[in-house]
Image (tube, grey):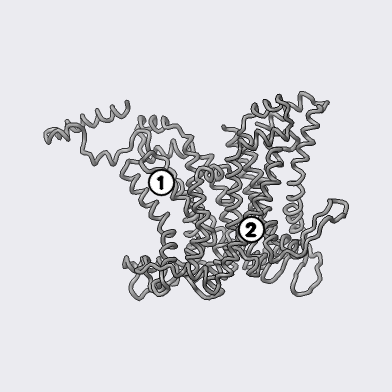
Amino acid sequence: MAAQMATRTNQKHRFTITRRQWRDWGLAALFLLPTVYVLAKIFVVPIYESAVWSFYHYNLLDGTPTRFIGLRNYQEILASSDFWVAFDRTVYFTVVSVAAELVFGFFSALLLHQMFPGRTFFRAIIIIPWALLTLVNGLLWDWIYQPGFGALSVILHGLHILGPHQDPVWLGSSAGIMNFVAVADIWKMTPFMTLILLAGLQSIPGELYESAMMDGAGFWKKLRYVTIPQLMPSILVALVLRLMGAFRVYDILTVFTGDPTTSVSYLTFNYAFRYFYLGKASAMAWFSTLFILALIVVYIWALKRNADAQ
Amino acid sequence: MLRQRDRALDGARATTAGEDARGPRARKGYPVWRKWFRARSTDLFPPFYLWVGLILLTVFTLAPFVYLFTSSLSEKQELLSGHLVPHRVTLDNYVRLFTGAGAGDFIHAIRNSVTVAVWTTVFSMVIGVFAAYAFARIRFPLRMTSLFAVLAMQILPSISILVPMYVMMRNGVQIDLPFTGVVLYQSPPLLDTVWALVIAYTTFSLPFVIWLLAGYFQTIPLELEEASYVDGCNRLRAMFQVVLPLSLPGIAATAIFTLLGAWDEFMFANAFTQTYASKTLPIAISEFIGKHGMDWGLMTAGGFIASLPPVAISLLLYRYIVSGMTAGGVKG
């Protein structure tokens, strides 16, 4: 909308730029100068450098000279099984946790949208998991998953689901870990989903439900024909935000396992700061960057569409 | 009206079933419990399912957090014998945290976390407020494109710039005049200092501040600003005397978000700080498990202490936190 207004003014004075416009542009430039300088210095230059280094053999520790090697870093990454294992696990984790967060968040939002006594209290407490430090969340779930004396084992023994002599090591295998990491992430990030969808629900008029009921719609039909179509813009935004968040998973994994092939971020971090293969790590970082950039394009498109619809 | 119709229908049903013979209560409508399974016309859930859902939601939301707290109040033997609720409550873990062998490091970590969070916030806010005003109020070419570029910077993961940032911190940061080769200031190497983290956190908090504040500024009516021009204010004075005071809640919310983001960050901290003098809380707490054995008591106590400020802030300033979340720039 604002962009349209700008074009309109431009059309009015297509050939003459007024003095006021010059003054405004000058002020804008002045106001933006510190930001542009800082962001250029600490964001644009680094991301450009990382693109350049991804084509170089650049190892800090082994004393080999830095030299241009073209696409070799990328080829090596694509040929390494570690990368593909990490990639598969990251995708698996992202899909599982975001899907579960969407379903749970959707139903929690529906619950908390309805009027009932004490609603403020219930709305407030759901923010607690989100506010917890990410790393503390990881440690807390690591504690819950401890074999023998962690809460999960204790509860399963108490319910006699596990026999008295069974004592599984929950975080034993790297493949299985992804499910347990997903549970921790679902616990922490479902509130985020809930709160975004809750905000979206406010804009659905109650009359729609009323008329759906007149047409004889039950619970599921109301969801199918009223709630979900009306909520679609919020669902899209929340979904893309969470996809981008889940794909970069790193913090929790460092707590749960020492195995860097559990996520692309972890593997990249390991290449950079365990072996100091800076060129290779830069190349691998670009896989994450491109993936997230693609999602950002979708996200901005969704935001623009929502803004236009209003 | 609709509800009246419902009631009339149900009454009719009850009559035909011959339930009115059972007394005045049944004649009034159907049995009370049935109301629990019927949604009102504008609602989705019947009360029964609503409350079942709410109880489940509450249990699943609070149980792990309560477990963190009860564990922090337990003795080591109780933790290792699987007592979910301590039979004897003790503050021993907290005492050890603040007076024990590692207390100095933990207190240092708190101080580092506060320093990093505060400086990141101050730095980002001071620079970002001007940019946000320009984006919200001044028309200039490529405005929307640049604003979306800022959003993209906010969302891109830390891993994208981690390696060059590390080298930058190792070599020291240069403040120079671009394209001239004139260096105004060359800092010493910043690895293992809190300043490395302040600079690194600015990469995501500055774009975030700009995006959020620009949104808040746009909600201030333009007429108010124009009225102040009539009174002879220039743009700068209008900004400081009209726009900023009116968006104070938004500014506060933005500052709080920036503080929380810096408080929570782990990846940069893990890469840039190795010494106790520079470690932040997440790193210090993670070291209770792993590096120095497995002290679950210390971990849960430390984790609870570190989580208390963000949890308390989120509960107290709930409305602002949610408005910031739905503004769409929060890293999910």
Where residue A48 sits in the image (x, y, percent)? 76, 55
Query: Label 2: how many residues lie within 10 Å, few (<14), some (14-19) or many (20+)?
Result: some
Disc 1 from disc 2: Cα separation: 33 Å
Q: Quadrant of residue B62?
A: bottom left
Q: Is residue A107 visible?
A: no
Residue toward you, B50 or B322: B322
State the residue in front, B244 or B190: B244
Q: Chain of mark 2?
A: B
Horizontal and vertical percent for residue B220? 62, 32
Q: Position of B271 compared to B31: left or right?
A: right
Q: Nearer the viewer, mark 1 or mark 2?
A: 2
Extreme-left residue of the structure: B21
How crowded is the residue under tag 1: few (<14 C-alpha within 10 Å), some, or many (20+)?
Answer: few
Q: Can residue B234 be seen at all in this image of the molecule?
A: yes
The quarter holding residue A286 reads bottom right
Image point 83% across, 55% down: which residue? B184
Q: Is residue A5 left or right of residue A109?
A: right
Mark 2, residue position: B115
Of residues A250 and A230, the one drawn nearer to the viewer in this rendering = A250
Find numbered disc 2 in the image and state the secondary structure of the residue it sits on. helix
Vertical order, B41 against B281 (above or below): above
- Residue beneath the point at 59% across and 64% down: B109
Cβ atoms at labels 1 and 2 below 8 Å apart: no
Q: The N terminus of chain B appears in which quarter of the rendering?
A: top left
* Secondary structure state at the residue bearing disc 1: helix
Q: Amino acid at mark 1?
A: Phe
Residue located beneath label 1 in the image: A121
Q: Residue A102 vs residue B228: left or right?
A: left
Query: Type of residue at label 2?
Result: Thr
Residue A143, numbered circle: none
- The answer to whether residue A145 is left or right of residue A70 is left
Marked residue chain, label 1: A
